[in-house]
Amino acid sequence: MSVPIKLSERHSDFFEQVYEVVKLIPRGRVTSYGTIAEYLGAKRGARMVGWAMNNCLKGDAVIPAHRVVNRQGLLTGKAHFPSMTAMQERLEAEGLTIIDDQIQNFQEHFWNPSEALIL
DNA sequence: CTTCTGACTGAAA
DNA sequence: GTTTCAGCCAGAA
């Protein structure tokens, strides 16, 4: 759906959208908070996406949050995982190479929600 | 109610 | 090239 929504209108939907997009991330791919936020129409809401992730940990929804990193491909959210190495281990298990909490060839493994529409 | 923080980003110095 | 500042929205104190 390419319908830009307003956070003030229905923030609940925004969170749900974030979860949907994150779930749609293919294995071995990664994306950034800003990308998801921008895709949802709130490019300034990158922090909200991250906050949504933190909230998702609290919820029952199973979200591959380890596939969501910052613009630099840095594992900024690793600290919020059950284990500090959980995020890196998970990404490495998917074929990614991470050095110093930074994804190597991040741009190659970068995934854009627009690709989901192609499929 | 006011104030601060935050899994971010982009621009400016 | 790095470092610093400001903006953004939502939730918690």
Image: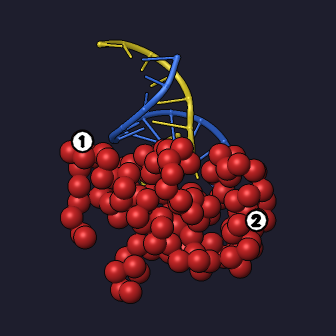
Chain colours: A red, B yellow, C blue
User: Which quadrant holds the C terminus of chain A?
Assistant: bottom left
Q: Name the chain letter of the residue that bears numbered label 1.
A: A
Chain ID, mark 2: A
Of A106 and A3, nearer the camera is: A3
Marks 2 and 1, how far apart at CA: 37 Å
Q: Position of residue B1 (x, y in %)?
A: 29, 13
Q: Secondary structure at mark 2?
A: helix
Q: Is residue A22 visible?
A: yes
Looking at the image, residue A116 sits to the left or right of residue A56; the answer is left
Q: Amino acid at mark 2?
A: Glu
Q: Is residue A90 left or right of residue A25?
A: right
The residue to which callout 2 is attached is: A89
Where residue A20 sits, quadrant-wise, is bottom left
Q: Depth check: give the residue in front, B5 or A27.
A: A27
Locate residue B1 relative to residue A100 in the image: left or right: left
Q: Which mark is residue A59?
A: none
Q: Which residue is mark 1?
A: A8
